[in-house]
Image (spheres, helix red, strand yellow):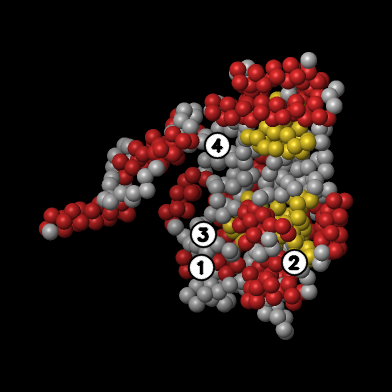
Amino acid sequence: MPKNRDAARANLENLYRIFTVPEARDSTLGSIDQMIADDVAGFLQTHIVAIERNLEEIEADFSSSTIPEEPTYVSEYTEFVKEKLVAQSVHTAAPAFIGHMTSALPYFMLPLSRIMTALNQNLVKVETSKAFTPMERQVLAMLHHLVYRREDDFYPQWIHNSLYALGAFCSGGTIANVTALWVARNRLFASGPEFRGIAQEGLARSLKHLGCEGIAVLVSERGHYSFGKAADLLGLGRDHLVKVKTDANNRIDLNALKEECRRLQGENIRPLALVGIAGTTETGNIDPLDALADFAQELGCHFHVDAAWGGPTLFSDQHRSLLAGIERADSVTIDAHKQLYVPMGAGMVVFKDPTALSAIEHHANYILRHGSKDLGSHTLEGSRPGKSLLVHAGLSIIGRKGYELLINLGIDRAKTFAGMIQQHPDFELTSEPELNILTYRYCPQSVQQQLSQSMPEQAGQINLLLDQVCQLLQKSQREAGKTFVSRTRLRVPRYDEELTVLRVVLANPLTTDEILATVLAEQCEIVQQPEIATLLAMIVTRDK
């Protein structure tokens, strides 16, 4: 028994050290932290290895379901971090990693992230975030002003108003979009003399009160998958998420939209919200926001703009006009962890009407009291970290002109890469860049000529083989770990069918034209591999 007490005391002392004194060893997490702080790019370059193990092999390191029984030294865990996590992580900051919406981070985000973590503020209530709460309110006002450009004298009455909020901080665009539609739903079914609102009475009684069979959200077929989640969570049903066809430029087709609205009217289904996209995930295109604002007004429904990707384009005097009409939206989503260059987990939704969030207001006796400035009373999420610090830092240090430079650079680079693809005989551009995203595919010049002379059925067979070529090409490039592009499937008007295409996102300011040329050169080498070469040979044989 005494031996057990001694062991317990030793463990307690060890735990006490974890919370107070870092281990003074070179191999501790502290040393890794210092290396990152000194030279983040060098650390990532040195410690993240080219992909040597596949996912199944990595999963073997995480296959035990047993929780360790005893405390251990941080230095021992450090070895696990270095060998199993850091070494096999994806180098998303690499300038040749151009396949997804992640990028290099400004160096100051790292020490500020450590400060944020050390302070461990909880933004659900003022009692645990006395300084962070007003800062978050200020950041929301800054983004609100970026979108809506209200007069300067508008904001003093709203920024720190305990009854309202100009928007909500979220963990990302998904929760931001859900919040926007949640507000729209609750405002549509607002309480009255004989009805206590949808939050109290539920959807079935709300529909009966409004005299309709259902409510629907309209968005283009390029809409983010988060809207399907929102339709599910809010009780609309995924069948009432109406995905409207797009035109040749991947923008919502206004004629198809009107046809869908006529269908809904005939079924006694009321439009809850019309969603415009400012920067589609797959192609970066922007819906005609002004026209959608007009149509939403005609329908009498909420107009939401998902600008998770393209919102920061508003910083650019040169390109801001691409988002004309966004200032008419009832709500707008912007992701800070995309083109505001903040670490993952920071999204926002702002509302044109500062009183809109009252529709989802909720309270608790121990926090979120009536009249308090607790931000948690207007958010879906409860406990949240102080990510507003990182957004505030970006807006303050980079500034509007700095973000303008980043946006302009990305759009220019996308146009440059599109030109490289069009000039290369063996690649085919499948979507022109409107912002800084584009798609293309490997399609040798001889095959392009063959497709131009083929009947639809024969062209379809050739494209099936080219789909396999692009899939294998992208997979091989990813596994090689030198450069990276993603892939998706899109309807390409030229062939009037859905094809597998390669997708590129050009937001990393460290990406150069030379790197882009290297991406294409590597792809030309990869298609020489036997498996891909065989598929290409089958196309030639089919022609004969």
Query: In the shown orientation, is residue 105 left or right of residue 186?
Result: left
What's the distance in space between the residues labelled 4 and 2, CA to CA? 43 Å
Instruction: Note whether residue 17 is visible.
Output: no
| Other residues around mark 3 within 10 Å, as few (<14) / some (14–19) / many (≥20) | some
Mark-to-mark CA distance, 4 and 1: 35 Å
Which disc is residue 510 wearing?
A: none
Q: Residue at x 69, y 17 (%)?
A: 537
Earlier-in-chain disc, 2 versus 3:
2
Which residue corresponds to mark 4?
92
- The location of residue 427, given as percent across then percent down, is 73, 24
Q: Which residue is mark 1?
A: 126
Residue in the picture at 28% in, 54% down: 15
Q: Nearer the viewer, mark 4 or mark 2?
A: 2
Measured as percent of width and height from the top left, residue 319 is found at 77, 43
Is label 3 in a helix, a strand or a loop?
Answer: loop
Say which residue label 3 marks: 384
* Sequence-first disc among 4 and 1: 4
C-alpha span from label 1 to label 3 = 12 Å
Q: Are marks 1 and 3 in contact (CB under 8 Å)?
A: no
Q: Amino acid at mark 4?
A: Thr
Q: CA distance from mark 2 to mark 3?
A: 34 Å
- Mark 2 = which residue? 214
Earlier-in-chain disc, 1 versus 2? 1
Which circle's residue, 4 or 2, is located before the other in the chain? Answer: 4
The answer to whether marks 4 and 2 mark residues whose Cβ atoms lie closer than 8 Å is: no
Q: Is residue 352 above or below residue 464?
A: below
Q: Quadrant of the N terminus?
A: bottom left
Look at the numbered disc 4 and give the secondary structure of its residue.
loop
| In-image side of 260 versus 311 (left or right) | right
